[in-house]
Amino acid sequence: MKIVGGYLDELRFTERQRKAFNLLKNVTGAKEELLNILQENSIKRTTAYSIL
């Protein structure tokens, strides 16, 4: 899974979604790895699941 930064400016997101996408921008990895990155940055696991 990869979040591509170029698409983020074109869409509207909540503050938490923007925070998550900025943390994951251009990061490649399995969903579990992305969830761990979000959790390490104070985003609860359930919220991270709903964002991804």
Image (spheres, rainbow, N blue to C red):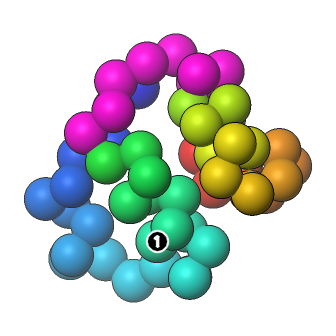
Residue 32 within the segment the image draws in magenta: yes
Question: Which residue is label 1 attached to?
Answer: 18
User: Who's the residue at 41% across and 45% down the image?
Assistant: 24
Work out which quarter of the rendered image holds the C terminus and state it. top right
Q: Quadrant of residue 34?
A: top right
> On screen, 29 above or below 11?
above
Callout 1 crowding tier (Cα within 10 Å): few <14, some 14–19, many ≥20 = some
User: Who's the residue at 23% across and 46% down the image?
Assistant: 4
Q: Main secondary structure of the magenta part?
A: loop
7 or 42, which is in the foreground? 42
Identify the element where label 1 is drawn: helix
Q: Is residue 11 left or right of residue 50?
A: left
Q: Is residue 14 left or right of residue 21?
A: right
Work out which quarter of the rendered image holds the N terminus and state it. top left
Which residues are drawn in magenta?
26-33
User: Who's the residue at 74% across and 57% down the image?
Assistant: 43
Query: Residue 12, percent across and down?
Result: 39, 83
Kind of residue at badge 1: Arg
